[in-house]
Amino acid sequence: MIARARVAAFDIVTAVAAGRADLPAAIARSRGILDDDRDKALAAEIATGVERWRAALDYLIEAASSRSIDRLDPEIVAILRLSAYQLLYLTRVPASAVVDDAVELARRAKKRSASGFVNAVLRSLSRKRAALPLPPRPPDAADRPAALDYLSITLSHPRWLVSRWLDRFGFADTERWLQFNNTPARLTLRANRLRITPETLTDRLAAQEITVVPGRFAPDALIVEAGQPLGPAHGQMQPGLFVVQDEASQLVSLLADAHGGDRVLDCCASPGGKTTAIAAAMSDSGVIVACDVRQKRIELLERTVADSGATTVRIVQADATAALPFSRPFSRVLLDAPCSGLGTLRRDPDIRWRRREEDFAVLAAAQRGMLEHAAACVAPGGRLIYATCSSEPEENERVVEAFLATSDGFRLVDARTIAGIPSDVVDPRGCLRTLPHRHGLEAFFGAVLERSGDANVV
């Protein structure tokens, strides 16, 4: 009988490969059919590992089979990828069990004729585990083809993206960035100051045998080193004491520099981490209007806000790609724009294979339109915060530059002047920019744009 976790992993990997779901959604769906928490964890680990190491796995499968991945049935590709990942990266799993399950999975997928092929490829990979024929780290980083082979295949990232980072950051920093992306991320929490301080939360978690340490940059960030705060222990704690939120994302919330009594608009607010962080910074006074476009996103936002205890948040279903339905302006407007997500490849490894370089033109056009709509809601003397979780200039500084070139009455504010923003995460232009190889954080961008006090609001 095939291990249930491997069956679930197969279903996840095939769903992602076929474009039926992204990785988080496919994993969430699999949890509904698995009873054992260990099976849930193993299925997620295998599927995530496959996406993280897909280029290396495909290269090795092609070498062992003498066939192009493109010539194999999608189901066989999925079986080989998840099995090769277990053989090469999860060595605690017996090789014989992996191979036997792979053969049974081929039969279960009605590919019985391919079972011998699957068996032969995996046994060949198992024999070569000690000396995998992957492109080596080049002795001379100036050898661009060798550097690209190593970075894109051995460290498993799209060649077009690696080429971009190599040009901008050089070999050593690009290598560190890719290694960062290939390391499983530790869980990061934000203490909800509406209910608890980071220090008290640390003590409460310690009582549940959960160890956390402060983040390096964000004042409310706590990084989990041991224990599981989302497991049974979490059920014994008051809801809303913390939010799961990347440290770089927490820094974006600080850019708003919101104070009690402010009137704030969060244009793309779900799941609510930034909204509730701003509510805490305002001591739950003033008004925050939190928007999103899809009903499921609104429902998630509502749950996050309710758990946080914030009473000043008003939730509105609105689409920032069109004119926003507000007559009164806001002192702070946050647009955390939909983007490529290329800054979050450590947490969402499947994104690296779904994005294409040609996506940037479409994304940037939409981002510029949303920024114009958000800007129309900013009061004289107010501030507009534009942020993404993208690493790429087309979605970041070039969007801001295009906006400033055509929008009178706005100026760029140096983020170093904002309380709580460390100068280490501010680039020479004055924008928030976190970089994996430099800060150990996901790649986020944020710009603060201030409207002049005498500007007209349309």
Image: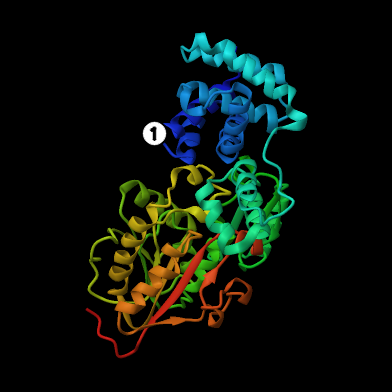
Which of these two is toward me, 326 or 393? 393
Does dot 1 land on a helix, a strand or a loop? loop
Residue at x 62%, y 27% (from the top left corner): 63
Relative height, residue 265 to residue 237 (above, below): below
In this rendering, is residue 318 above or below 126? Answer: below
Q: Is residue 85 above or below residue 388?
A: above
Determine the residue located farthest toward the top in the rendered image. Answer: 113
Residue 195 image-quadrant placement:
bottom right
Outermost residue toward the right in this view: 130
- Residue situated in front as seen by the camera: 430 or 185: 430
Q: Quadrant of residue 394?
A: bottom left
Mark yes or no: residue 46 visible.
Answer: no
Image point (70%, 33%), residue name: 133
**Residue annotated with mark 1:** 20
Q: Is residue 50 left or right of residue 216?
A: left
Are there few (<14), some (14-19), or many (20+) residues within 10 Å of tag 1?
few
Spot occupied by residue 290 in the image (x, y as percentages of width and height):
36, 62
Q: Is residue 390 left or right of residue 20?
A: right
Judge from the rendering whether residue 448 lies leftward or rightward of residue 54; answer left or right.
Answer: left
Residue 168, image x and y in percent? 56, 63
From the image, which quarter does the N terminus lie in?
Answer: top right
Task: Mark yes or no: residue 228 visible.
Answer: yes
Query: Residue 71's spot in the image, x, y percent?
Result: 47, 24
Q: Nearer the viewer, residue 72 or 110?
A: 72
Residue 125 in percent (x, y) is at: 68, 24
In the shown orientation, is residue 458 left or right of residue 44? Answer: left
Q: Amino acid at mark 1?
A: Arg
Residue in the image at 61% along x and 25% along y: 83
Screen quadrant of the C terminus: bottom left
Total labels: the figure holds 1
Q: Nearer the viewer, residue 399 or 211?
A: 399
